[in-house]
Image (cartoon, helix red, strand yellow):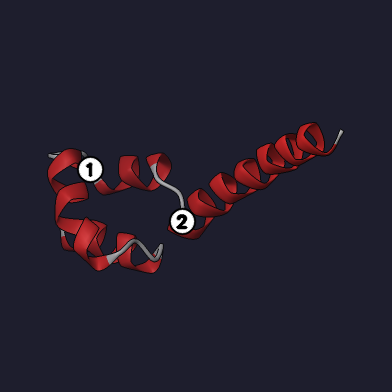
Amino acid sequence: MENIKQLLRDYEYPEEAIPYILKELGTTDYEQVKKLIMPYGDITANRLDRFHSNFKKVSVIHHE
């Protein structure tokens, strides 16, 4: 469990989210967790890219 907690910290997950994530993961082993999750910054970067992409589409519609 400690190694999963450290992995989440290494992946820059918010400290307050770690207990909830660990609870959701339950008895999932370390190697499986390592395959399932991605660094927190990558997740939010992807969301921001989608947001900016959608924002550009909306901006074009409003300026036509």
Q: Nearer the viewer, residue 33 or 9?
A: 9
| Crowd around label 2: few <14 · some 14–19 · many ≥20 (10 Å) | some
- Is residue 17 positioned above or below 24 on the image? below
Residue 57 at what x, y percent from top left? 75, 35
Quarter holding residue 37: top left
Q: Is residue 13 left or right of residue 27?
A: right
Residue 56 at what x, y percent from top left? 75, 42
Q: Nearer the viewer, residue 54 or 25?
A: 54
Mark 1 against mark 2, which lies toward the viewer?
Answer: 2
Which residue has dot 2 on it? 39
Tell me what residue is drawn at x 13 percent, y 39 percent.
27
The amino acid on which the numbered mark 2 sits, given as a three-letter code, is Pro
Say whether disc 1 or disc 2 marks the residue closer to the N-terminus: 1
- Is residue 28 positioned above or below 34 on the image? above
Q: Nearer the viewer, residue 23 or 60?
A: 60
Q: Which mark is residue 17?
A: none
Tell me what residue is drawn at x 43 percent, y 56 percent.
40
Image quarter of the N terminus: bottom left
Whether residues under marks 1 and 2 lie with C-beta atoms below 8 angstroms apart, the answer is no
Which residue has dot 1 on it? 29
Residue 13 at what x, y percent from top left? 34, 61
